[in-house]
Image (cartoon, rainbow, N blue to C red):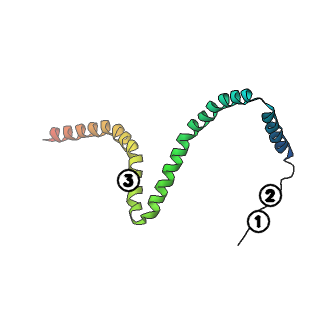
Amino acid sequence: MTATYTIRTTGHTGLETGLEAAAAWMKELPAAGRTALMLAGGPLLGLAFIVALPVAGLVLAAWMAVRAAARKWAGAGAIVKRVALFAAAPFFGLAYLIAFPFVGLGALVWYGFRAARK
């Protein structure tokens, strides 16, 4: 079975002619000029990879997590629960931190009234 996929671009000739002009300009440059451009462009290309690496790593980690969850549907609920509790733990801690002074004051008042009644 063979398939043919044809793309017809109309109205985008400015980009094509610009790329062709850049390629022709590069061919006309002497070797030293091309080397200088490569030396200047190489670090910029490396910087682009360094900037994109964390995003690519997160995407890869998410992809691997989805694949692992798809393999073990039965255990996926426990994993999701653990991840959700891990994500919610700081908020639970903050709620405890805010509530403890009021709980302590309430306990102090409660035991004070109990002692006063006796």
Q: Indicate which disc, 3 or 1, sits on the residue closer to the N terminus.
A: 1
Residue 110: where, in percent of width, then height?
Answer: 23, 41
Residue 30: where, in percent of width, then height?
Answer: 77, 29
Give the farthest residue toward the front.
31
Q: Indicate which disc, 3 or 2, sits on the residue closer to the N terminus.
A: 2
Quadrant containing the N terminus is bottom right
Element type at marker 1? loop
Task: Give the amino acid at mark 3.
Answer: Arg
Element type at marker 2? loop
Task: Give the amino acid at mark 2.
Answer: Ile
The residue beneath circle 2 is 7
Cα distance in 3D space between marks 1 and 2: 10 Å
Q: Which mark is residue 82?
A: 3
* Mark in front: 1 vs 2: 1
The residue at the point 53 percent across, 48 percent down is 59
The residue beneath circle 1 is 4
Quadrant containing the C terminus is top left
* Mark in front: 3 vs 1: 1
Left or right of residue 81, residue 47 in this image: right
Given residues 101 and 8, the one toward you in this image is: 8
Left or right of residue 106, residue 83 in this image: right
Cα distance in 3D space between marks 3 and 1: 49 Å
Neighbour tally class for label 1: few under 14, some 14-19, many 20 plus, Cα within 10 Å:
few
Task: Give the amino acid at mark 1.
Answer: Thr
Given residues 104 and 7, the one toward you in this image is: 7
The residue at the point 67 percent across, 31 percent down is 38
Element type at marker 3? helix
